[in-house]
Image (spheres, grey):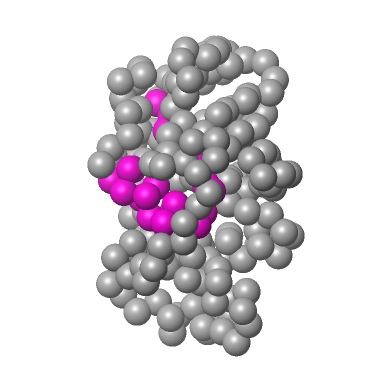
Amino acid sequence: MPDWSARVSVVFQKNTPTFMKVYRSAINYLWGDIIEKDIPLKRLDYKYVISSRLVYECFHYLNRDRCNESLVDISGIQLDENLIIMERMEYLQHDTQTSVYARSNLISTYKTLMKIDTYGGLLTGVFHIHPGKGPESIRPSVTDINDQMRREKVGMKAIGAIFSRDGFFRFFSKELGINIEIVGKGVKKHDRHLYQLENTCNL
């Protein structure tokens, strides 16, 4: 694994508690093999609320590159013990992008987490797109599940979502109990976590 500490410290001061908390989260977000200990989450059924407009914006952003997978973080706020509002996209730079895999850049991830922390928010989601079409193309891969498990093991409440190229999308987690509410028009629900963008003429 590359030694990112020196590179990050050129840009940011390392002597603040916030830095150490967010920096460790960024490292563990990308490389789960260096997690020192798990941070247990309360086993609640979290309710995530997201607007249909944000869902469409995420899809269009992720689908702009028709050849490669890409990632985007979603920031938001937690209003009470189990209610989480997903508010906006946080754009990431990528270290790796292929037709079947994408990984965000560590410094870009750190900057994103630091910005979210500055305003008292939290990372609420990590969305990406798969190369295929239809609901069968967006089942989480082993890599997707492992990445999600790493986030949950360090205490993050960010859930995953996968889009297909024709507008299906699926939310998922590893251990978190999740309920999704999409507010607004233009989204069809197929089952508990599977949805479809209805305005396909704009896809």
The N terminus lies in which quarter of the figure?
bottom left
Left or right, residue 131 beside residue 64: left
Residue 100 screen position, x and y as percent: 27, 40
Q: Quadrant of residue 86?
A: top right
Question: Which residue is rendered at x = 58% and y = 51% of the image?
Answer: 123
Question: Which residue is rendered at x = 58% and y = 60% of the image?
Answer: 112
Left or right, residue 129 beside residue 143: right
Looking at the image, is 175 positioned above or below residue 182?
Answer: below
Q: Would you say residue 99 sits in the magenta stretch?
A: no
Q: Quadrant of residue 69?
A: top left
Whether residue 160 is visible: no
> Which is nearer the eye, 191 or 144?
191
Q: Residue furthest front?
A: 43
- Write down the region rendered in magenta: 143-164
Residue 192 screen position, x and y as percent: 48, 20
Residue 114 screen position, x and y as percent: 62, 66
Looking at the image, is 12 positioned above or below residue 49?
Answer: below
